[in-house]
């Protein structure tokens, strides 16, 4: 079977789909290769991600990875969300076919973009390197 059961489950029943109207951070990213778009909303209270939702115009793998990513960061400190790699999300899903790995990058980038938005809006200082997802290799 091409996709793991977890991927199929998250694709069929994605968790945390939707938008948060009064989100504290919103990240929107696109994948240049396929043109798919991902939008991530974070509600942050006292440095804890109390709620997270996503919307996507993306493929099934992008949906599954975003769904899993939201589950992994919900209730966690912002710093942990920043450390979430697409690799960790893929592992939590029991893998993705190699040619679909780039889809998982969208989820990681959207989370990071939303955290950056939160930092910017609140004047929180950060190390720009943490958001330099364009210049390192995702595997
Ligand atoms: Fe575009 Fe998967 S093919 S994100």
Image (tube, rainbow, N blue to C red):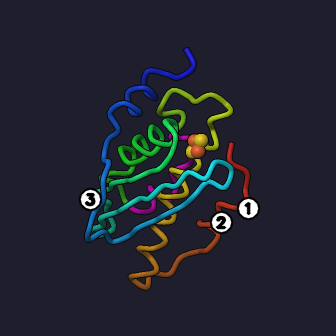
Expressed as whole percent of the image width and height from the top left, the position of residue 130 reads 59, 66
Within 10 Å of disc 3 (Cα), the crowding (few <14, some 14-19, many 20+) is some
Q: Residue at x 59, y 48 (%)?
A: 105
Q: Is residue 87 magenta?
A: yes
Q: Tell me which secondary structure the magenta stretch mostly adopts.
A: helix
Within 10 Å of disc 2 (Cα), the crowding (few <14, some 14-19, many 20+) is few
Residue at the disc numbered 3? 50
Are the residues tagged 2 and 1 within 8 Å (C-beta)? yes
Expressed as whole percent of the image width and height from the top left, the position of residue 111 reads 47, 58
Quadrant, the N terminus: top right
Q: Residue at x 33, y 71 (%)?
A: 24
Q: Residue at x 64, y 48 (%)?
A: 34
Inter-mark Cα distance, 3 to 1 = 30 Å
Which badge, 3 or 2, comes first in the chain's sequence? 3
In the image, taking residue 3 as reference, residue 14 lies left or right, namely left
Residue 132 is labelled as 2
Inter-mark Cα distance, 2 to 1 = 6 Å
The residue segment tinted magenta is 78-89
Disc 1 C-beta below 8 A from ligand 1: no
Choose between 85 and 96: the one closer to the eye: 96
Which badge, 3 or 1, comes first in the chain's sequence? 3
Are the residues tagged 3 and 1 within 8 Å (C-beta)? no
Q: Element at badge 1?
A: loop
Residue 67 figure quarter? top left
Residue at the disc numbered 1? 135
Choose between 131 and 60: the one closer to the eye: 60
């Amino acid at each position: 079977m091409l996709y793991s059961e977890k991927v199929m489950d998250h694709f069929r029943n994605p968790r945390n789909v939707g938008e948060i109207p009064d989100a504290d951070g919103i990240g929107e990213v696109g994948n240049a290769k396929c043109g798919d778009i991902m939008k991530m909303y974070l509600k942050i209270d006292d440095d804890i991600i109390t709620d997270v939702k996503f919307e996507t115009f993306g493929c099934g793998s992008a949906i599954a990875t975003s769904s899993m990513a939201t589950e992994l960061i919900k209730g966690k400190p912002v710093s942990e969300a920043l450390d979430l790699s697409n690799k960790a999300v893929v592992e939590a899903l029991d893998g993705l076919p190699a040619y679909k790995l780039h889809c998982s990058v969208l989820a990681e980038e959207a989370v990071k973009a939303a955290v950056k938005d939160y930092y910017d809006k609140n004047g929180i200082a950060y190390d720009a390197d943490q958001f330099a997802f364009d210049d390192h290799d995702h595997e």
